[in-house]
Amino acid sequence: MKKNSDLGLLLTRTIISAPMLCYGISKLINGIDFIKAMMVEEGLPSFFAYGVYIGEVFAPLLMIIGFRTRISSLIFAINCLTIILLSQIQNILSLNEYGGWALELIAIYFVISISLFFTGGGRFAVSTTSKWD
């Protein structure tokens, strides 16, 4: 039974991280000027925008390979929360054009990353022995 749980954690880590990594790669290619502008608009220093690379590139890569999954998934979750607070807060009680919750995708990313923070990466991960796995 444990073997199936470990496989489930591997699939979860990979499936939740890969799409976010695509967003991060897009930002590496196209830049983050729009994020810098959002930061300034909210009264934050524009250099905070570079954190997007940590949350959307570095953390997902670590989660996929299972290196320090708990820490990387916490960083991932903080990134998701930042996205909600900076660009989606107006949609928190809104439905999309199909009747679903407007924040459902980013909320799914957030909740699954929090779940991985509690479970760790499982046996099929690069780091499995640390208490911070």
Image (tube, helix red, strand yellow):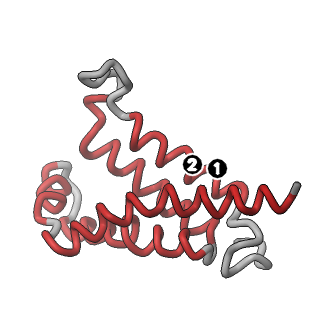
Q: Position of residue 51 (x, y in %)?
A: 33, 68
> How far separated are the C-alphas under marks 2 and 1?
5 Å
In this rendering, position of residue 53 left or right of residue 130: left
Q: Identify the residue under disc 1.
A: 115
Identify the residue shown where x is 41% and y is 34%: 104
Q: Report which quarter residue 56 is drawn in.
A: bottom left
Q: Quick check: 85 above or below 31?
A: above
Q: What's the residue type where badge 1 is placed?
A: Ser
Identify the residue shown where x is 71% and y is 61%: 7
Q: Position of residue 33 (x, y in %)?
A: 11, 65
Q: Nearer the viewer, residue 96 or 41?
A: 96
Q: Nearer the viewer, residue 45 or 65?
A: 65
Q: Identify the residue under disc 2.
A: 112
Q: Position of residue 128 (x, y in %)?
A: 75, 76
Q: What's the residue type where badge 2 is placed?
A: Ile
Q: Quick check: 74 above or below 31?
A: above
Mark 1: few, some, or many residues within 10 Å (few <14, many ≥20)?
A: some
Identify the residue shown where x is 49% and y is 47%: 110
Q: Position of residue 82 (x, y in %)?
A: 36, 51
Q: Quick check: 24 above or below 44?
A: below
Tags 2 and 1 touching, CB below 8 Å: yes
Q: Quick check: 38 above or below 126?
A: above
